[in-house]
Image (tube, rainbow, N blue to C red):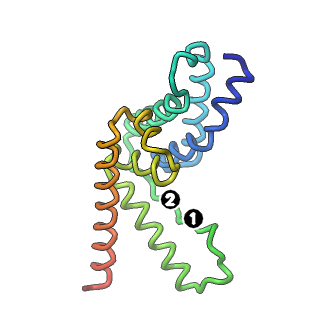
Amino acid sequence: MDLQAFKQRILPVQGRLFRLAQLFLRNREEAEDALQDVLLRLWTNRQQLETYHSVEALAVQMTKNLCLDRLKAHNKQKMAKDADLSGVQTEAVSPYLHTELADSAGLMRRLIDELPDQQKLVLHLRDVEEYSFDEIEAVTGLSVNNIRVILSRARQRLRDSYLKANDYEAGY
């Protein structure tokens, strides 16, 4: 694989790989480092990339494995990410609503962090990256039916945990 082919096949998925790394590492700098390592490994092994059915699936798998390895090596707690409400018009939103949205976003991130890694990965690939079930199957090696079950359980767990947290905080 030459430089031009590498740019056409690998670099377009760079954003997805970065978001996946950031999901696991919860630190922008570490996610950038992980992405750089993955890209370097892909470039180093560019001659073998033609043998893979989906280079994107390989890149996602490499990113996931590298992030998990880094988390195990550092043996640290995942840091909660500040609520990112850049898409919300702050002028049109009252300070109370803004605070409520930030709290809800922070709670949802914490609940997602508490999911098992497999559920977190499948949920991220499907709902954030909008991968098809076939693409998730290629990345994870799981069957489509298994992916659907994992996704359903992850969503149900999030829903139940979110409602429980809100009911508990409301004092009901």
On the image, numbered disc 2 is attached to which residue? 81
Is 45 on the left or on the right of 135, as rendered? Answer: right
* Image spot of residue 77 (x, y percent): 38, 50
Is there CB contact under 8 Å for labels 2 and 1? yes
Residue drawn 39% across the image and 35% down it: 140
The kind of residue on which mark 2 rests is Lys
Residue drawn 38% across the image and 54% down it: 113
Q: Which of the numbered marks, if any, corresponds to residue 84? A: 1
Q: Give the vertical position of 60 relative to 82 (above or below).
A: above
Furthest toward the top, the residue is 47
For discs 2 and 1, the disc positioned in front in the rendered view? 1
Residue drawn 29% across the image and 42% down it: 146
Q: Nearer the viewer, residue 97 or 27?
A: 97
The kind of residue on which mark 1 rests is Asp
Furthest toward the right, the residue is 4
Q: Give the vertical position of 142 relative to 95 (above or below).
A: above
* Image spot of residue 87 (x, y percent): 63, 68
Residue drawn 66% across the image and 76% down it: 89
* Image spot of residue 115 (x, y percent): 33, 53
Which quarter of the figure has residue 104? bottom left
Crowding at dot 1, Cα within 10 Å, few <14 / some 14-19 / many 20+, comes out as few
> What element does badge 1 sit on?
loop
